[in-house]
Structures are given as structure tokens and as C-alpha cells.
Amino acid sequence: MSGQSVGVVTSQRAHFDQPLHLRSGGVLPAYDLVYETYGTLNAAKSNAILVCHALSGHHHVAGHYADAPNNIGWWDNIVGPGRPLDTDRYFIVGLNNLGGCHGSTGPSSINPATGKRWGADFPIVAVSDWVEAQARLADLLGIDAWAAVIGGSLGGMQALRWTISQPERVRHAIIIASAPKLTAQNIAFNDVARQAILTDPDFHGGHYYEHNTRPTRGLRLARMLGHITYLSDDQMGEKFGRELRNGSFSFDYDVEFEVESYLRYQGDKFAGYFDANTYLLMTKALDYFDPARLDNGDLVRAMGRSHPDTGFLIASFTTDWRFSPARSKEIVAALLANGRNVSYAEIDLNFGHDSFLMEDAHYHGIVDAYLRNIQL
Amino acid sequence: MTNTLGRPDFDLITAWIEPGHRVLDLGCGDGSLLRHLVDSRGVRGVGVEIDDANILAAIRNGINVLQGNLEKGLDEFADQSFDHVILSRTLQTVRHTEGILREMLRVGREAVVSFPNFAYWKNLRSVLAGRMPVSEDLPYQWYDSPNVRFFTLLDFEALCAQMGLIIRERHVLDEGGNMVDNDDERELNFLGSLAVYRLTQQR
């Protein structure tokens, strides 16, 4: 793909004093959001795009830091001058969601009421709460309506929720590798991941910070399990096959197969920096997401709450079995039933659910073509 | 299968569509027809297309397009949700002929169908000379053709009668896109390279 990186970026922090009433019934009296922006907001403030992150994402969407050139944003390949999220044309905003562990208020932040870290006392936040917090960030930035809200997976759920919760404030939603709600199988995977964390002796009921420890074993297992579900069988076969690290069986339980080595490495890496409470919270936000619930499960009625002029681009990947094309088509059908403007692409990419993060000329071409047609 | 404007069937189809109508274009290619209908008739349009390059081109064209396989039906569309459902030069590529025609008239009030006529005299001449026809309206070699059904005007009309479909209008064009008319149906079947039909059914 042509185009360039946005280069050096900096993070910003915003403090919000207005209490946030959460879906769970809890209240966050005040909170911080960290965010990054790329490109320039035009005079009409009509060129802003919100990028919503998925389970393990954050505000560092693109570019790198001056003091950390190797810390490249998680979706750098799609953002920048000449790239689909073209910073010559658009003003891009990425943030770390509430409950995150990359600087926004979350379980590892200090609870002002106790002076200690929130830990397990941090309220569970829902996708609709994130949208509310994101709307307040938009207020702060002077953005009345996003040209587009875009996200993959859990990020796509936020984009979808925007169109229902804040219909006047989103002109286009780009929902990639997502679903209108999780299936039982998906919830089951999440629960196994949570059980790995919750049963880790170092979890201490979520207050592990006070014990100067972290449930890294559980978090590592959770990530290994998740990782398997984000890849396709074919891709794992191509990448690892049954390759052995030492060429022959060693008849013990050490790392033997390359795929074991890879998964353990991924698990260790993730457990080294991610917060277990945030992982629990993010998976619950996924499980609870079901915007049709308030309409008695009727997704058509739920999508009818979107603005008639909001445009939708829905994309799925053929090898994504965690958020399969059929799930995206449910969203498409509900939008069609409401006469909404919607386009749907089913992209043949071999990377399973993780395809949404990959650089591919056709996939990026679709997003690019859609965004170039938005009138600013 | 790139669609280009200036295709004679586009003008005929456009004339049948009222401003503001809801239009579904099956096998919409790069979206040229829908783009044209949006611009000239202000329709609310959706296209369905299977090919990656066409999906990209249709999105570039700024139309609503859904990637899908017509052989699998039109489940995502509700009954009678369109005024017109168009199948332009695509019926011959669909295996489930009856199925797609029924689906078109389930989701739409009217179906517009155009297809190459295998009985066109040049096609017949080619077959008589021992080779499968390659023409303006059948532009493929037999081994790389997306077409899976080869039929004539009269074949199609017999199927419509069998299915209880009502032919509201019909236009027959020669290879140059000129309208052909003849009182003798068999003559017409011989002279027409492309046929465009407007269909409904009793409800």
C-alpha cells in the first residue's frame, strides 16, 4: 500500500469531572482519557474520524514516539498521508477506553475514594459507556459529528453502538470483523480466559497490586487461548505446521512444536504488559454487548434508531471464525430492513479474526474507496 | 464483466424507473447502472456483486453494494422491499434460474431481466460453422465463460409462462444496440442479440 506513516506522535490526556453513569448502575465520579490525534481538524470540523480499539488496543493507533521509535501504533498500516485513513484529509482520533491499562482511568488507576488502586472495585463498563465517554471527548475537541467512526472486532461494536446511541453525531460507521452480539461459543471462549485469570493464585480477588504481584500465569493462558481463536487453522498450518524446534520428539512436556513456542512467546509478551483486570473487563464488555436487547432482541428495531442519513460500511473476513461473515451479515440485513445506506465486503484474507489488522491491498482499497467518497 | 455506460439496455431500464424508486441491481458489476440511476432518477439503490474487483469499483462509484452470491438467494432482503429488481446480463450466469426469478419477485414489485439471446442469427451461424459463438453480447470463449445457461427469447418466455410470470414489456436489440421489432416471434428470436424484459407476477 502506498502512503506514509504519520511519523512522530504524542499522547494527550483529558480530565473529565462530570460523573459518568454506567450501564452497570455504577458511577465514575471523574476520569481521565488518554488520546492521540493525527492530521488537522478543518474549520468546519467535519473531517474527524474516531478509531475505536478492540480488546487489547489503546490510543496509540499510528506513528511512533520520538523517544521510542520502535513503539509503532497498532493500526499504523492504515493511518497516514496517502493511506486509507488519510491524515492529509482527515483528523484522526484514537483513545484508550475507560477500564483500559494504557493511561485512561481503569482498574490499575488510583481510586480517589481510597487512595489505592481500584482493582476489582473498578465498575464494569459497557460498550455504551465507552461511547458516552468518547462523545465527551468529541465535545472537548469541538467535534459535533464524526465524519466516520471506525473499528474492528470490539472496536466495530463501538462504531455500531455510536450509530444507535448518538445517531446525530456519526455520519458514517465502518464496522469490520464485528458482530451485533457474541454467540454462546464466543462467550465460552471469554469465560475460559477469565477463569484462567480468576483462578490464578496471584489474582487475590483482583487486588493483586497490593500484594505486589500480578496473575501473569492466568493472563498468559487467557492470551494464548484468545490468540488461537484470532487465527485461522490454515494460517497456523502454513506458519507452523508440525515443525519441531529440535527436529525430533523429546518425549517430555517442554516446548517442542513451533506453534507451542509461538503461543508461549505471545502469552508471555502480553502478560508482561497488560493488566489482568482490564482483560476481564474488556471480555465482559464483549459478552454484554447486545444493542438489540433494549428492543426485545429485535436488531431491526435497534438499527432503526440510527440516523437515516448515516452510511455504513460493513466488512468481514472469510477465514474469521470468531466473528464470522454471517455475523456481519446480520448487521447488514438489519440495516437493509431500515433502508439505510450500507455496503458490505467479504474479504478473502487468510489471517482469521486478526485479518482486520493486516495490510492488504484489497481490504485497504475498500476502506480507502469508501472514505474518499465522504463529503467533508 | 465490466459494465460501461452507453450500453443500450441501460437506457431502456432507466426509462422504466421512476424518480425515487427503490432499486436492487443483482450482479451490479462496477455499479455503473446504479450510479446512473442515482444521478438521473434519484433512486435509492443497492447492488449485489460477487467479484472483489467489482465490489471495490462499486464502492469507488459511491453506490451501496453488498458482496454476495446470487445462487444462495436473497435472504438478507425483506419481501417487497424494492420497486425494481434488476438482473442485467446476469441470468445466464446463474445456475438456479427459477430460484433467482422467484426471489427477485419476492423482494421486488417488478423484475427487470436482460440476457443474451442464444438464438441470435450470428450465434446460430457460428454454431453451424462448428464453433461456439463469441459476440458483443456473448463476449467469452467457451472455456472461460461465466455463463452456465444458454437459452433463447422463446425459451425464456416459455419459462415465464410456466412460472406464471407476467411479461409487462419487452425490448429486443441487435448487436449494435438498435431496437428490433417483428410481428413474427420466431423471426424476432432470430434477429435479437439481447433481450430486456419487465416482469411481474400475480399477487
Image (spheres, rainbow, N blue to C red):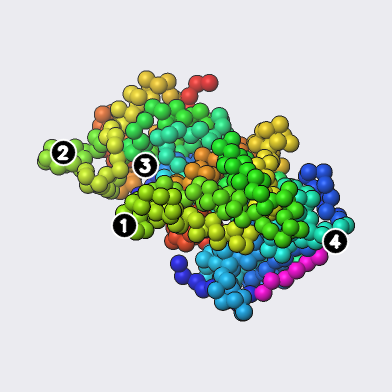
Which chain is home to disc 1? Answer: A
Earlier-in-chain disc, 2 versus 3:
3
Q: Classify residue A271 by image quadrant.
A: bottom right
| Chain that bears disc 2 | B
- Left or right: residue A262 versus residue A72 is left
Chain bearing mark 3? B
| Residue B81 position (above or below residue A46) | above
Q: Position of residue B48 (x, y in %)?
A: 47, 43
Which numbered tag is attached to residue A115? 4
Magenta segment boundaries in residue numbering: A10-17
Residue A247's mark?
1
Q: Is residue A309 left or right of residue B109?
A: right
Query: Which residue is at the front of the view, A79 or B44?
Result: A79
Q: Circle 3: is it few (<14), some (14-19), or many (20+) Cα within 10 Å?
A: many
> Is the C-beta separation of discs 1 and 2 under 8 Å?
no
Between A311 and A133, the one nearer to me in the picture: A133
Residue B127 - label = 2
The spot of residue A141 in percent (x, y) is: 76, 66
Amino acid at dot 3: Arg
Residue depicted at 27% across the width and 44% down the height: B145
Element at badge 1?
loop
**Labels 1 and 2 positioned on one and the same chain:** no
In the rendered image, which residue does mark 3 sit on? B89
